[in-house]
Amino acid sequence: MRTIDTDKLSKEMNDALIHRACVMRSGQYLARYLIHRNRSVDAIRLIGRCSVHDISKIQNMEEFMSLASIVDDIDSMHDITHILSEEQTNAIKLHWSRNSHHPEYYDNSNDMSDLDLLEMACDCHARSKQFGTDLLDYINIQQDLRFHFDKEHLSKLRAYCCALVELTKNDDYADVLSGDKMLGFDFKDSTMEMLEKFDEECYVECLKTERLYLKKQDTSDFASVGYTINLREDNSEIGYISLKFNGYIEYKVYENYRGHNYGIEALAKFIEITSMSELLVNIKKDAIGTRKVAEELGFSPVQVSENTITFKLKKRSNNG
């Protein structure tokens, strides 16, 4: 079973939204600076980058959950000499690996483009506004600890940061940082209760039937588990099957392999090993074959919409 701290999830979401708003504000200042230096194209590109800055924090659930686990340590950013702990580093590595405005995205930090450096300057500047730290001191210290830029890259980053400090010296970002402006989030609800009960221990790396083996896949969605369906005979991948934390199953057998009851065989094995007592599947009304598969396995229709029918299966307990 997983342990979920909904207070941390709420705090991480609020921090992500506030930070994105601050980065966009810093990006607008730096874009105006670029235009003033006949770099309008770069200004447009920077605004584009800032508009989707750190979007992976919200789009990728694995990354979001990982960062939420350390969100209480965010106050450590008040200390510009702070060195990330092993737990913090492991949590933030997912974010670094998906965002090119972090030096750690590259094998060599000097592979960062000028656009990467522009976004990085806005990122660092936004954090300095949020936590009241000295931006240039932060850059100097982190150069030795993390960045390891060559002279050219470091000079560019410092120049962009100096411009931001000067341009925003009379702007404290108060309207962005004000708690009164935030809607706030509280993720305590029945969905999270269901997620906490989602037990992944029964889903081993490989499931075998007479003709098939189901190979577990790595997914970025922490709230589901998925397998490819493969033929034991020649290792051909013939479809997939997945289960979400709320009990919904999705599966498909590719067209060239239909008509051999592979779907029933894979589903039956999956139903056998899952710890969930109730399973659901949405099936299109015109998918007669898929409906027959579900019914043969004991699913019954419980809800009809315009295009689909929801089928439910209640598993019998081990005690009968």
Image (cartoon, rainbow, N blue to C red):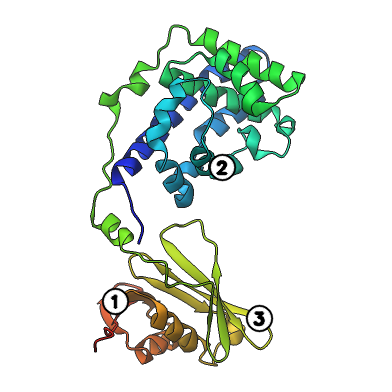
Q: Position of residue 76 (x, y in %)?
A: 44, 26
Q: From this view, report whether residue 25 is shown above or below residue 229.
A: above
Identify the residue at image location x=46%, y=66%. 225
Q: Position of residue 216 (x, y in %)?
A: 54, 70
Q: Could you tell me the amino acid type at mark 3?
A: Ser
Out of 290 and 9, give the one closest to the viewer. Answer: 9
The answer to whether any part of residue 25 appears in the image is no
Q: Which mark is residue 27?
A: none
| Residue named by callout 1 | 277
Q: Earlier in the sequence, mark 2 or mark 3?
A: 2
The residue where tag 3 is placed is 236
The answer for how far apart the CA atoms under marks 2 and 3 are is 34 Å
Packing grade of label 3 (10 A; few <14, some 14-19, many >=20) is few
Q: Cα distance, mark 1 to mark 2? A: 36 Å
Residue type beneath disc 2: Lys
Numbered badge on residue 93: 2
Mark 1 and mark 3 in contact? Answer it, CB < 8 Å: no
The amino acid marked with disc number 1 is Ser
Image coords of residue 206 (percent x, y)? 54, 76
Of the two numbered discs 1 and 3 in the rendering, the one whose residue sits closer to the viewer: 1
Quarter of the image with the N terminus is bottom left
